[in-house]
Amino acid sequence: MVDRSLRETSPDALHATLAEAAGAARIWSSLAPGARATALRAVADDLAAASAELIPLAIEESHLGTDRLTGELGRTTFQLRMFADLLDDGSYLRASIDLPDSAWPPAPRPDLRRMLVPLGPVVVFAASNFPFAFSVAGGDTAAALAAGCPVVLKAHPGHPRLSARTGAIVAAALAANGAPQGTFSVIHGDEAGRSAVTSEHIRAGAFTGSLQGGRALFDLACARPEPIPFYAEMGSLNPVFVTQAAASVRVSQILAEFATSFTLSAGQFCTKPGLLFVPADEVSDALIVEALATHRSGAPLLNEHIRQGYEYGLTALTDHASVRTVVGDESSASADPTPSVLATSVADLLKASDELLVECFGPMSLVVEYADDEELLAAASAFGGQLTASVHGEEDEAIAPQLLEILSQVAGRVLWNGWPTGVSVTDAMQHGGPYPATTAPLHTSVGSASIERFLRPVSYQTMPDRLLPPALRQENPLGIPRLVNGEREVV
Amino acid sequence: MVDRSLRETSPDALHATLAEAAGAARIWSSLAPGARATALRAVADDLAAASAELIPLAIEESHLGTDRLTGELGRTTFQLRMFADLLDDGSYLRASIDLPDSAWPPAPRPDLRRMLVPLGPVVVFAASNFPFAFSVAGGDTAAALAAGCPVVLKAHPGHPRLSARTGAIVAAALAANGAPQGTFSVIHGDEAGRSAVTSEHIRAGAFTGSLQGGRALFDLACARPEPIPFYAEMGSLNPVFVTQAAASVRVSQILAEFATSFTLSAGQFCTKPGLLFVPADEVSDALIVEALATHRSGAPLLNEHIRQGYEYGLTALTDHASVRTVVGDESSASADPTPSVLATSVADLLKASDELLVECFGPMSLVVEYADDEELLAAASAFGGQLTASVHGEEDEAIAPQLLEILSQVAGRVLWNGWPTGVSVTDAMQHGGPYPATTAPLHTSVGSASIERFLRPVSYQTMPDRLLPPALRQENPLGIPRLVNGEREVV
């Protein structure tokens, strides 16, 4: 029996879905922020209430574990509620009022009031590796809906039934809370996804996945007759640098933490530490093998596509003349891969950076030995845009500030004595970075600031109070934080 | 004698300039904001001190008048000082601190601190119509330098000697105030401009000019191996809608103001009102002719390129079967054009929107007569992205909120009983809009918020205080506004 949810969305059905999203935009965007907050909380409540149904579906389709998926569903409902709180607070509107000033240079200033408004319908591409938190009801969906933008969600084929079920819950909860038909819908199939990116009804796109996939969609978005912003998060190598001083004090502890981090969820995180730079004289194969001792069992990958990609990437690295295998994949051909650690030197890495500085999504990492601080700094300077870069060091080391300065140039998040896996959902989180980590270095796809991707500013000039949006009216009926003449308004 | 400043920048010279900009980036970006503020104020002081030299040069090369150019230079120095004040204030860094929270869902939250950092070297394309405020030392340059980004300024060929002289003053003032060589440089020639957009050293671009030129550069920026943000402001039709009620009370006054606005600086503003929608039964050719009575003299256009483009565009509109000429260009072939007003109906406009909804840069505008409110709303719904849209109405009219809602969907700035020319430089100004007004609907190219185009967020996780940037250290040594756990920090 063919599962309906597996069918690709037909061009006719897609056309209807996109037109409905465009129709819904005006109503959904003009609801009071508090009304959208209520709807988002209802989505969170209904997803939480359905966990006994959703978690088993997710396990079946993603092969991830119960604890991981339970935590991820908790993160998903937390994100929805965080955006609801953000709507209630209102600071996300960035309301700013400049009162008239006849002495303003070079010409008198009129009454000007600026706030952010929704961009319009957004197409969101779900990821495979977070079947909840970066999928149907994930961060991109929550941020766009909170901003006031209808969402057309392109489901990931890795978990089609979970996508359909989650989508039905989201749509029902929204509909029961004042959202018009078309505020949220799920589409299936790559061709439908590409068509959505080029549709006149779509005003922005968001994506989490591979560099190849993200770049192709970004190119489509830019080549439109009317280009639209396309926010693709495309992964990262997430290099980790262990200084001489840190290694001499605690190399075994660092290697143990490294093993835990890169094998988490079978290495299927875009924040997996893909490279560990350690001083050659402080590390040995024996130490690495010892660190992996409690991480030798295999774990299933998300799907056959990911598995094939992993095997291909691992083989290419393993077979590279400059790379040696410290811990190899010990699984038989058809079994789940066990964690691998490869090794090379900075000199060899820099000579073959095109082949070795590539993301290999799965349970492997590359240890890179450096001879001295000069090599360490040279290695740190070799990276393009990264989601994260980490340093394990001692804070009074001379090299620490140099290393951090270099890494701040390329990474969205810089960690000290920490591991990049585990992305906290907060105000101050930055999950993004220069290309090729993302196509949009000014933005984050995790945390409250991710709502900014779906909002644009509008200024109202000499507008009568009653015709202004409530957020900008003189009496501040929404009670939101605002700037007046550049200063925080006293309420 | 060939003026050196007219020579196109050679590939070798360009290469050296771009490499210097890249070298300057680390130093300029890491100066304390206060040091960059001092340098920007010095630029403003030196430009103001050179006005007796610069204004005549500008008049000679742009054909604009003394008053206009004096005001524009005042605006330019004001912008530089505004950004200096912004640097001193520090709120532009959007510093945000989330303290550790072991109860944070779904996992304990680490110490996370987020702020904005400079993107890196920016190529800025100067405009012809604002030889000061959107040229060498204009808003884009001021915003990028303030952000901490070196600027490679592609001069507009319309005012080469003014560009060279202004550039020399800017570079000298910066150098005298701690900016390294390469912080600011001027390049000449379209090929050099295109090469800069595709250079590995350049991290963003900004442009003010034509749709064709802006789109071509945007496409280059997006097609790079590593795409970069490209902020093109490409002009606008700036439709103005006069409601039935407003017209019945004060159509003559509105037409007089309209004539003043669209003929200002010979219509060479990207905010020129290009279309005026008026009720058919309240307007007549005689009233329009009367409104133009004090605006019949010719004025020189900026340069021959602009003049040819204007003549071509005006002829195409004048010759269109659906358009009649109410006030024609009365100049002889070689003389300066006098203001023109053409007219059509909403029905004809919508039938031929591809030919009639096009910007014609110069002293002309199109009056569009509508029969009833239904036609007015249909016309308002016909527009793509605009820098501005204006309504002249009475605030208790039923149509006012409908019209404003439609226009807020497409315009960056919505005006009530005002005229779009005259863009105030303030916090709450939005000079931007959806495509084709710009390539970056989330941003403004005028006002303090324009600095955001050149900054990207970085989060620091569990970083020791001494290794954090000063803006994020616990004791807040810069004394800047910050959020701590989402609340404004109490200083």
Image (tube, coloured by chain):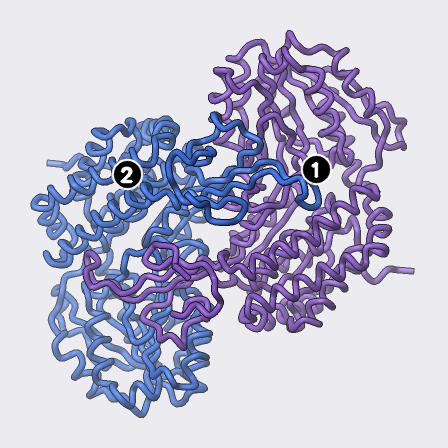
Chain colours: A purple, B blue
Q: Chain of mark 1?
A: A
Kindly identify which residue carries mark 2.
Answer: B37
A483 over A309 or under it: above or below:
below
Q: Residue at x 68, y 49 (%)?
A: A134
In-front residue for pair A229/A52: A52
Give the percent coordinates (x, y) of residue A345.
Answer: 63, 14
Q: Chain of mark 2?
A: B
Secondary structure state at the residue bearing disc 2: helix
Residue B261 is left or right of residue A114, and the answer is: left
In-front residue for pair B316/B431: B431
Q: Residue at x 20, y 88 (%)?
A: B286
Secondary structure state at the residue bearing disc 1: loop
**Which image quadrant: the C terminus of chain A?**
bottom left
Residue B221 is left or right of residue B21, and the answer is: right
- Report which quarter residue A31 is drawn in: bottom right
Q: Is residue B467 visible?
A: yes
Neighbourhood count class around disc 2 (C-alpha, 10 Å): few under 14, some 14–19, many 20 upward: many
Give the percent coordinates (x, y) of residue B171.
Answer: 23, 34
Report, in whole angstroms, how far the alpha carbon at label 1 lies from the one at label 2: 42 Å
Q: Which mark is residue A269?
A: 1
Residue at the far right: name it: A1
